[in-house]
Image (tube, rainbow, N blue to C red):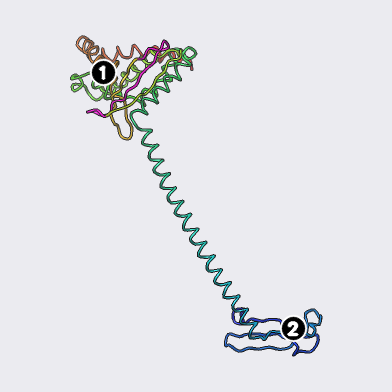
């Protein structure tokens, strides 16, 4: 019979002989039972005073009351534990949502126009600080990945060539785009050759008809600020530079178009590709030899 069905109490009883006690029980059918049993480990129970002897029924009622109180307490503890678990689950869910939002915000910020320019500036400063050690070819090799990662080379090449682009074959466009990317990298390797405390800072950005305009300034070692703005166009998940405005007015693409038009007129597309390569080829050869 299981413990739930029967409860037993060891009672010192005047009704049992010396050296025995009364074993009282309560079965699930409501019947009360009791019998005399030898004292535990052979030790006499002794003759208990009458006033200290309680009836089996009273003891059983007290035992059942304690059992019911214990069950009630256990239920309360379980409910409290369940509420606590539910609370922490809610906290964990809220934290997860918060982390998701934070993760999304960080990701969005990393692909903004301002961040693209900031990444370019960090690469430029790092190269400038090691400019003399790297030399022209080393600066070119270090900057070329950053340039291709930050600039929309294909769009800038197309805009710099102008109307003549439509007449080019696919192979000519690919060749010109690659040469233009190397040309831009060579220009930056030449311009940003050493570090003397210059600061390159992104100061803000604003919507523009063709994308986003990122504002920045380059503070020379003398403290003189130069305003440099970047026109950004979205390309998939990233913002890429499609034009640069010096002092907020002089377009890099417009300047290149004027230069390229003269070459295209006299030497054609092959002459333009050769002119672009002449700027980068010496740096590429030197970089290859240095490795």
User: How many circles with numbers are drawn on the protein?
Assistant: 2
Q: Nearer the viewer, residue 142 or 215?
A: 215
Q: Could you tell me residue 57's position as x and y percent?
A: 63, 86
Q: Identify the residue at the far front of this view.
A: 51
Question: Looking at the rendering, which quadrant does residue 74 occupy?
Answer: bottom right
* Marks 2 and 1, the one that precedes in the sequence: 2
Tell me the CA gap for discs 2 and 1. Answer: 108 Å
In this rendering, position of residue 162 left or right of residue 74: left
Q: Quadrant of the N terminus?
A: bottom right
| Residue name at image x 30 percent, y 21 percent | 229
The residue wearing badge 2 is 12
Rendered location of residue 287, percent (x, y): 44, 16
Which stretch is magenta?
A: 207-225
| Mark 2 or 1: the one toward you | 2
Residue 63 place in picture, x, y as percent = 63, 78
133 and 282: which is toward the camera: 133
Question: Mark 2 falls on what kind of element?
Answer: loop
Residue 224 counted in the magenta span:
yes
Let me know if residue 13 is in the magenta part. no
The percent coordinates of residue 235 (x first, y second) are 30, 32
Q: Pick the residue in front: 110 or 283.
A: 110
- Above or below for 82 versus 271: below
Does 30 appear above or below 148?
below
**What residue is pinned by disc 1?**
253
Labelled disc at residue 66: none
């Amino acid at each position: 019979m299981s413990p739930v069905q029967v409860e037993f109490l060891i009672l010192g009883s005047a009704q049992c002989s010396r050296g025995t006690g009364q074993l009282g029980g309560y079965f699930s059918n409501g019947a009360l039972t009791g019998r005399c049993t030898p004292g535990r480990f052979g030790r006499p129970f002794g003759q208990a005073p009458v006033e200290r002897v309680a009836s089996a029924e009273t003891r059983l009622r007290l035992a059942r009351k304690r059992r019911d109180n214990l069950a009630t307490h256990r239920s309360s503890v379980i409910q409290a534990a369940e509420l606590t678990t539910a609370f922490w689950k809610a906290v964990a869910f809220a934290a997860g949502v918060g982390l998701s939002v934070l993760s999304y915000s960080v990701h969005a910020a990393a692909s903004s126009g301002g961040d693209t320019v900031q990444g370019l500036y960090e690469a430029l400063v790092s190269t400038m600080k090691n400019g003399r050690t790297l030399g022209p070819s080393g600066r070119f090799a270090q900057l070329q990945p950053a340039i291709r990662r930050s600039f929309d080379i294909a769009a800038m090449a197309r805009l710099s060539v102008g109307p003549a682009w439509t007449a080019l074959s696919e192979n000519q466009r690919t060749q010109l785009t690659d040469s233009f990317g190397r040309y831009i990298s060579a220009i930056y390797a030449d311009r940003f050759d050493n570090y003397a405390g210059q600061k390159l800072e992104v100061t803000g950005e604003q919507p523009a008809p063709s994308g986003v305009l990122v504002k920045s300034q380059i503070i020379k070692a003398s403290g003189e600020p130069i305003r440099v703005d970047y026109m950004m166009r979205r390309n998939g998940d990233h913002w890429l530079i499609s034009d640069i405005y010096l002092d907020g007015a002089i377009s890099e693409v417009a300047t290149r178009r004027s230069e390229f038009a003269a070459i295209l007129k006299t030497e054609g597309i092959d002459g333009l590709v050769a002119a672009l390569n002449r700027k980068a080829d010496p740096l590429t050869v030197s970089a290859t030899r240095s490795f």
